[in-house]
Structure formats: structure tokens, C-alpha cells
Amino acid sequence: MDLLQIGLNELGQGYQISPNLIACNYCQTEYPYEKQPNEAIARMKEHLVTVHKGSQQALVALDSKYNTLTTKQKELLLHFGSGEKDQEIAEKFEVSPSTIRHQKFTFREKAKQAKVYLAQFEAIFSEKSLPEDNLLPVPDAAGIVDDRFLLTETEYAEIVRKYFEFSTGALVLTVFPKGQKNIIGILNRIVEEFTMHTHYSGKEVDEQLKAIYFDYLLIKRYLIDYGFFTRTPDGADYYRLD
């Protein structure tokens, strides 16, 4: 999901609409849109609820380095979105109603700051001055960085579309690709299944990778070799890097 290209409404509703397709922001699920738009939107809304627990939940829990909310702030936002009264929320968090009201005020102030910054950014950086196709970030622990890592967002989207299957709602790698750029492309997508700044045991990593590809040890080795994961020397602790 390119946060510079997607509009605020699209980000909030959880999907994007093109002339022919409606696409989920959080996975590769797409539905034909042109002939039966109302049906396509209804199917997408149902998909967001059944697979991503709704558009609000998916957005608040967005696994991105740009989502800087704390766990408690995320919980509060979801409670605010549920329509609960301040007193009810205060009782659940074991704080005073005034604390909840202050938190609402803080969220509003942050929203005002973000709105001003967004206006400033858009006023300075027109679409013509921005790169037409940004490069994917290179893992901090990648070691030697060469042309293999010069992967554009368009190239990445094509790789994901070509090598992954999403029909069951889960990420499945259909075939391990040839070529270093293709491999780096699939690694970028696979590592998104792991939460940043979270430690995993070797067993936990194996279990998640098994669900994606049968040769999970191959995937794990590439994730480490290419700097997407770091681990302790004994292999007991794995950590996803930015």
C-alpha cells in the first residue's frame, strides 16, 4: 500500500476503486467493479469484516512503521469508535472519565497537527515533483547492497501478484522464484506477516513460514541472509527489522 498515492477516504474505508477493480488495502483480494459496482462494494465490505475484523480494526492495527500509536492508544480509539460513553470506557480502563476526555482532546490535537502537515506537504511537493515509482526500502542489516535491492513498488506489486495466492484469505507462496529481484520481492511480502519490533522463537517463525511455503527453512534462511530478520547466535530468538 503506497501511502502517498492513496487518499484519506480510501485509507479509512479499507479499499481502493479503479475503473475495473475494487482492491483491499490489506491483502491482494480484488473484485470486478465495472459491471456491478454495488455488489463489488458489498463483497469487499464483507471481506474486510470476515478477514480483517472490519475497516476500523484493520486501520488502527495497521502493521506499519508509520503507525506510531501505542497498544493502549489503539484500544482507546477502537472504544471511541464503538460509540461507548466516556464513563463506560473509563470503567473498562480503570481511570476517571476526565482522563478519557483528555485523551480524546489529545487525539483531536494530533489530528489538527497532522492535517496542517499534510497541507504543507502537498503544497510543497506536487505530484510532478515526487518520484513516479518509489524504491522499496532496503533492510538495515542487508549487508552488501547492490542492484538486487533496487526494486520499485510497481515491480514489487507484479511479483506479489505473480507468485502468491490469496484465495483462502491467507498468504501462500505458489512457487519459489528464480532471480534475485524476484526473491527479494517475495521476502518483502513474507516479512509483512511478522510484526515489527517483536521477538519470535525459532518455533514460532517456523510455524508461520510453514503456512506460507512448504520449504519454510529455505525462506527462513533467505530472510536472515538478506537482512529481513536478525537472530541470536543460538537461533532461539528472531527479530524483524524495519
Image (cartoon, helix red, strand yellow):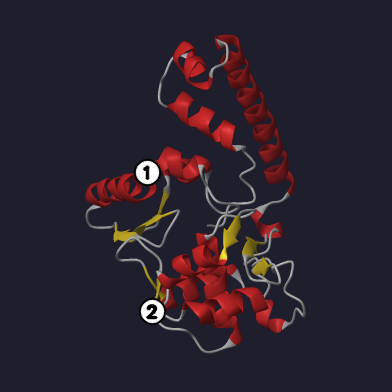
Label 1 environment density (alpha carbons within 10 Å; few <14, some 14–19, many ≥20): few
Q: On the rendered image, what quadrant is the C terminus found in?
A: bottom right
Measured as percent of width and height from the top left, residue 6 is found at 53, 51
Q: CA distance from mark 1 to mark 2?
A: 26 Å
The residue lying toward the viewer, choosing from 240 and 204, is 204
Measured as percent of width and height from the top left, residue 9 is found at 47, 41
Q: Earlier in the sequence, mark 1 or mark 2?
A: 1
Q: Amino acid at mark 1?
A: Lys
Residue 67 occupies quadrant: top right
* Residue 135 appears in the figure: no
The residue lying toward the viewer, choosing from 187 and 7, is 187
Whether tag 1 and tag 2 are in contact, CB under 8 A, the answer is: no
* Residue 165 appears in the figure: yes
Left or right for 70, reference 82:
right
Q: Which residue is mark 2?
A: 174
Q: Residue at x 24, y 46 (%)?
A: 38
The residue lying toward the viewer, choosing from 73 and 199, is 199
Q: Which residue is mark 1?
A: 53
Q: Residue at x 52, y 46 (%)?
A: 7
**Number of marks in the rendered image:** 2
